[in-house]
Amino acid sequence: MPRPGVAVAGLGRIPVANLQPVIEGGAHPAKTVVGESFPVTANVFREGHDAVAATVVLTSPDGRELRFRMAQAEPLGLDIWSADVAADAEGDWHFRVEAWSDVWGTWVHNAHAKLPVGVDVELVCLEGQDVMRRAARLAEDAGLTTDAIVLRSAAQAFLPDRPVRELLEIAESPSINRLMRDHVVRELVSPTLDRPLLVERPRALFSSWYEFFPRSQGAHRDAQGHWVSGTFDSSHERLEAAAAMGFDIVYLPPIHPIGTAFRKGRNNSLDPGPDEPGSPWAIGSSEGGHDAIHPDLGDFDAFDRFVSRARELGLEVALDFALQASPDHPWATEHPEWFTTRLDGTIAYAENPPKKYQDIYPINFDNDPEGIHHEALRILRLWIGHGVTVFRVDNPHTKPISFWRWLLAEVRRTNPEVIFLAEAFTRPEMMAALGKVGFQQSYTYFTWRNEKWELEEYLKELSGSQASYYRPSFWVNTPDINPTFLQSGSPAAFTIRAVLAATMAPSWGVYSGFELLEHLPLREGGEEYLDSEKYEYRPRDYNAPGNLNVLLGKLNQIRREHPALQQLRHITFHHATNARVIAYSKSEGDDTVIVVCSLDPFATVDSEIYLDMAALGSQPSDLITVDDYLNWGSHTWGQRAFVRLSPQQPAHIFVVRR
């Protein structure tokens, strides 16, 4: 039998059950970032009728403890206790719940039951004096002499010959109850086991991504009509533009040499022209592999200048980490065991039926796992050494989970600042597992969630229990995905998706061309871009009339100014009577943002909005003033409001004035 008060795996002297967030029984840490408020919940109960209470204890890597008193949640009969807690430094933390017998709470209950009817008055007074004097000693031990004096005075005044009304006034005194909470007398303290908690830097949760191809920036045809690639040096302008629009991460597709064998041409054709550059995901040629730079883009000095300029602008550089190879990659000859050889003697190329990627060999992680593991780690550390702090990982769901668990832990051991974004559009369990083993952020199904009911359902899922291991990044488009919702080219459609992505999730992303309303599909019913930049140079005039540069900048500015949009968990959906209108609010502390957005880019829509006033920190009868940060202007709203949204003005972003 475990000794009383010792942490146990099961139920202790004061039972604590269903502690959350615990990931896979504690095999993986729950995740948070510095300063992020997150809920800890548990069922706390005991035999009999004495009061219980509970405390969440966060323990920092250096042993420092932060304590948060838990409160019982409705319905009380379910014994659910919770507290919103936050860690104040990065590192490997732990947390536990300590349940305990609440001596003061039990006494207050007994005093209210017995004193008015004259039962055990003298004994009740003695017990009250005792618990207040015990609290006074705790105050003295903490060096709070004034608190101790007040508590002793209250104890001395609690005499059985005083009127019951006066005795109850002492027991109900807000100041006395505050002091009794501050210097709480705890008995039968029953801690749970410590559970792991990973605390990361805030950008692991809150970030705005902008993706572009350096080879297209400054690309042009020479006097003979041949393409000349853009370079890192010619891409500084795009860094400046991304910073001006308020983005904080610029993501580059693979920058390595591109193979020539089975090179893909324009629109994924199998017969490329002499000037067609090939897909950057077909990594590797005689000029090198994952540890080399495509010579058309520049050398390592040019890359270092690019990273340095990004830092000057307040940007971080994200590189694509794609563990695959072209048939020309040095690995194909130096390590053929790293690939799958089929029965006909050929090396298997990548397929995602009906798509075929003849220019890419996937890695076989079972032939030489140790060699592949350490080569991947070597490559990451090379680029980290050149200032890369973020990696977007291509197709991580096609590699073993055990590999990612090892690799991400090794990187975090030496470089805990590095962030990994999982580009996985696959089955939910695989996407969840990638988050559990260490990916800081993950792509999502947002691209395919367009109806109100599915957006609400998806956000409730992401902001609920998943939030402790899966951080969503909402992308409005990618080089691979030209969403059907955008293929009309309607500016309202682009605005709607940008507003939803930027305000629903703390992390969102934009692939260049979105701000120019690029929308033509390769084929009807498909989601690939016509003339995809994956296979050709696409220099653009980013200041062309009708661009969304100002909108993107305004969205990122609002995000930076409002903590409510920098967190994932506290989102409330409000009832909009029109199915083509969605309304939701996000809150953090005193900051509350309300978003009302049309889901119809082609028509004017009217809707009544019924606000959940409690979620806004107000009473049902209150009036609130909201300032529209997207369109300017102010409104006074009650519990019921009205909106009219048009293709010219399809969304409002309101901030509740305090």
Image (tube, grey):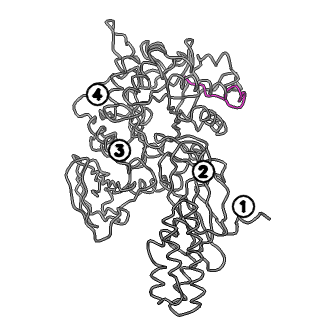
Badge 2: few (under 14), some or many (20 or more) residues near its Cα, within 10 Å? Answer: many
Percent across and percent down for residue 37 are 47, 53
Percent across and percent down for residue 604 are 22, 53
Foreground label between 1 and 4: 1
Residue 581 position by quadrant: bottom left
Task: Decide which of tag 2 and tag 4 comes sooner along the chain.
Answer: 2
Cα gap from disc 3 to disc 1, whole angstroms: 45 Å
**Residue where numbered disc 2 is placed:** 59
Furthest toward the right, the residue is: 1
Q: Residue at x 53, y 39 (%)?
A: 424
**Residue where numbered disc 4 is placed:** 542
Cα gap from disc 4 to disc 3, whole angstroms: 23 Å
Q: Secondary structure at mark 3?
A: helix
Marks 2/4 in contact by CB < 8 Å: the verdict is no
Q: Residue at x 23, y 34 (%)?
A: 546
Furthest toward the left, the residue is: 633
Cα gap from disc 2 to disc 1, whole angstroms: 17 Å
Q: Which residues are magenta?
A: 359-373
Q: Secondary structure at mark 2?
A: strand
Marks 1/4 in contact by CB < 8 Å: the verdict is no
Q: Which mark is residue 559?
A: 3
Cα gap from disc 2 to disc 4, whole angstroms: 49 Å
Badge 4: few (under 14), some or many (20 or more) residues near its Cα, within 10 Å? Answer: some
Give the answer, above or below, for where 540 lies relative to 441: above
Q: Is residue 515 left or right of residue 42?
A: left
Q: What is the three-letter code of the residue carrying label 1? A: Val
Name the one closer to the observer, 239 or 617.
617
Task: Decide which of tag 4 and tag 3 comes sooner along the chain.
Answer: 4
